[in-house]
Amino acid sequence: MKEFNLPSAHSSAVRIALHPLHAILLAFPVALFPGALLADITYLNSSEMQWSNFASWLIAGALVFTGLALAWALIGMLARRVERESVGRGWFSAILALLFVVGLVNAFQHSHDGWSSVGMTGLTLSVISAVLALAAGWIGYAVSREVRA
C-alpha cells in the first residue's frame, strides 16, 4: 500500500506533481491525441472525409501543446539540479519528445488526400500517439517534486 507523506506542522516542504500551468499544457495532448484516434476510427468506419479533417485538426492542436509542454519540461530539467525524482522526470521528458516526433509524423500522414490520409499507417500512428500521450499524462501527474513553502 502506498504511503502518503503529508507535510507536518513543522515542515515547510510540500509535494506537488507538476506546476499547475505545466499540468494544464499537458492536459491538451492527453485529450486531443486520443480524440484524433477516435476520429480516425470513425473515418475508417464511415468513409466520411470530414472525420479525417477533424483528426488532422486535433493532431495539430495536440502538437502545439505537446511542444509547449516539452519546452517547459526541458527548461525545467536544465534549470534544476539533480533531484530525487530526476529519473521520473527524465522518462517524462523522453516520452514527451517521442510523442512530439510521432505526432509530427502522424500530422504529415494525415496531410495526404483521401483514403491515404488515414489507412493503416495513419491509424497505427494515431494509436501510438494516443498511448504515448496517456503515458506522458500518467507519468507527469504521478511523479512528484518537493517545493519549499
Image (cartoon, grey):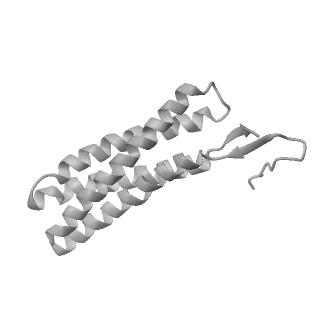
Residue depicted at 35% across the width and 42% down the height: 100
- State the residue at coordinates (41%, 49%): 132
- Closer-to-camera residue (143/9): 9
Residue 33: x percent and y percent?
36, 56
State left or right for residue 99 relative to residue 84: left
Image location of residue 41, percent across then percent down: 26, 67
Closest to the observer, 7 or 45: 7
Residue 114 visible in the shown view: yes
Position of residue 53 relative to residue 26, above or below, is below
| Count of marks, rendered view | 0
The quadrant of the picture occupied by the N terminus is bottom right
Q: Residue furthest bottom?
A: 46
Q: Is residue 25 left or right of residue 48?
A: right
Q: Residue at x 60, y 32 (%)?
A: 86
Q: Quadrant of the C terminus?
A: top right
| Extreme-right residue of the structure | 10
- Give the image quarter of residue 89: top right
**Up-down: is 25 above or below 147?**
below
Along the viewing direction, whichever of 84 and 63 lies nearer the viewer: 63
Q: Going 71% across and 39% down the picture, which residue do you hit?
A: 147
116 to the left or right of 98: left
Q: Where is residue 146? Give x, y as percent.
A: 71, 39
Quarter of the view holding residue 130: bottom left
Compared across the picture, whether 123 is left or right of 72 comes to: left
- Residue 83 location, x and y as percent? 66, 30
